[in-house]
Image (cartoon, grey):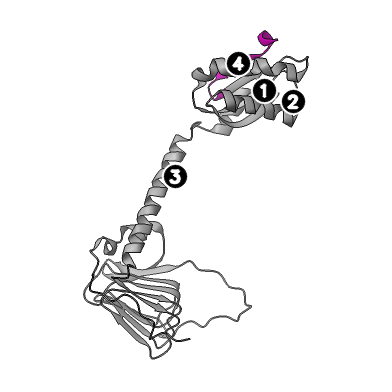
């Protein structure tokens, strides 16, 4: 029975041929031997397995895959049953990178960048360098900080925030904001909804065209969801751009040493 079970490797996979007749269970010892004997040859490649010679049920195909996993280091990407053009279909399914090395490298790089971004954000909002305001800032409220400011709420029209560092608004920004107020052109302003009356960063300033914030639509009105945005200085002018990881990661503000003299947190100015 063993000599009726054949296995061969092609460029992108394994072709496994079984005899047309005979009990399937009786073939399994021969299948196991084939996998054991070829384990070193195939190594730990990512391959597709083509099973030819007889029609198998899903359960029978699963048994063969189980033996493949138990007796080799091959990473099976899929199974083709009764395929007459195995090599062509292998290549179509796997593409030019059967081992997914490029994809894995890209994912690894993305993960490293994400970790760096998170670490930079943590540094920016460190309690020694960031004042945290819990709740909305209503008209007449005026918050100032030598470092950064994070508002967990809205900055309403008539409210203002002045920060030596960056300003983070985890809500709607509709008032006046001044980041990098002591001459830091690398500071920026982040908002979940960017709709300020006036924005200042260091020596640059921008004012809303009609000097009034946009009115929100009704509670049940349909409207497009805009991504969070960042205001920063580019070529000497303030520009507003959607937030992305590259923007956060490359901002030089994060590379600066923390100001250990900055106060920790405050919420006295926040409204209900």
Structural distance between the alpha carbons of marks 3 and 1: 32 Å
Residue 107: which disc? 3
Comes first in the chain, label 2 or label 4: 4
At x 59%, y 19%, the residue is: 35
Residue at position x 33%, y 60% from top? Answer: 120
Instruction: Say if residue 88 shows up in the picture.
Output: no
- Quarter the N terminus occupies: top right
Q: For the residues marked 2 and 3, what is the alpha-carbon distance in whole angstroms?
A: 36 Å
Q: Rate crowding at label 1 as few (under 14), some (14 to 19) or many (20 or more) other CA atoms within 10 Å.
A: many
Q: Earlier in the sequence, mark 2 or mark 3?
A: 2
In-front residue for pair 214/256: 256
The residue where tag 2 is placed is 56
Which residues lie in the magenta part?
1-13
Foreground pick, 37 / 92? 37
Q: Nearer the viewer, mark 2 or mark 4?
A: 4
Q: Is residue 236 above or below residue 42?
A: below
């Amino acid at each position: 029975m063993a000599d009726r079970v054949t296995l061969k490797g092609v460029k992108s996979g394994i072709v496994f041929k079984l005899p047309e007749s005979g009990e399937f269970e009786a073939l399994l010892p021969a299948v196991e031997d084939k996998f054991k004997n070829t384990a070193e040859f195939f190594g730990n490649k990512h391959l597709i397995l083509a099973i030819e010679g007889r029609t198998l049920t899903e359960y029978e195909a699963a048994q063969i895959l189980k033996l493949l996993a138990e007796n080799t280091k091959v990473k099976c990407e899929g199974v083709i049953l009764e395929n007459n053009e195995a090599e062509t279909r292998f290549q179509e399914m796997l593409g030019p990178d059967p081992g997914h090395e490029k994809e894995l490298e890209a994912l690894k790089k993305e993960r490293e960048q994400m970790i760096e971004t998170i670490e930079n954000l943590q540094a920016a909002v460190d309690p020694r360098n960031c004042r945290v305001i819990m709740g909305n800032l209503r008209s007449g409220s005026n918050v100032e900080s030598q470092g950064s400011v994070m508002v967990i709420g809205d900055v309403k029209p008539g409210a203002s925030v002045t920060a030596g560092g960056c300003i983070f608004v985890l809500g709607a920004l509709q008032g006046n904001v001044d980041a990098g107020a002591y001459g830091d052109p690398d500071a920026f302003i982040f908002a979940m909804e960017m709709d300020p009356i006036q924005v200042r960063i260091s020596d640059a300033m921008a004012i809303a065209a009609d000097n009034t914030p946009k009115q929100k639509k009704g509670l049940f009105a349909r409207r497009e969801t805009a991504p969070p945005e960042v205001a920063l200085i580019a070529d000497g002018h303030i520009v507003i751009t959607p937030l992305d990881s590259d923007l956060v990661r490359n901002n030089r503000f994060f590379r600066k040493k923390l100001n250990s003299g900055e106060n920790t947190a405050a919420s006295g100015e926040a409204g209900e």
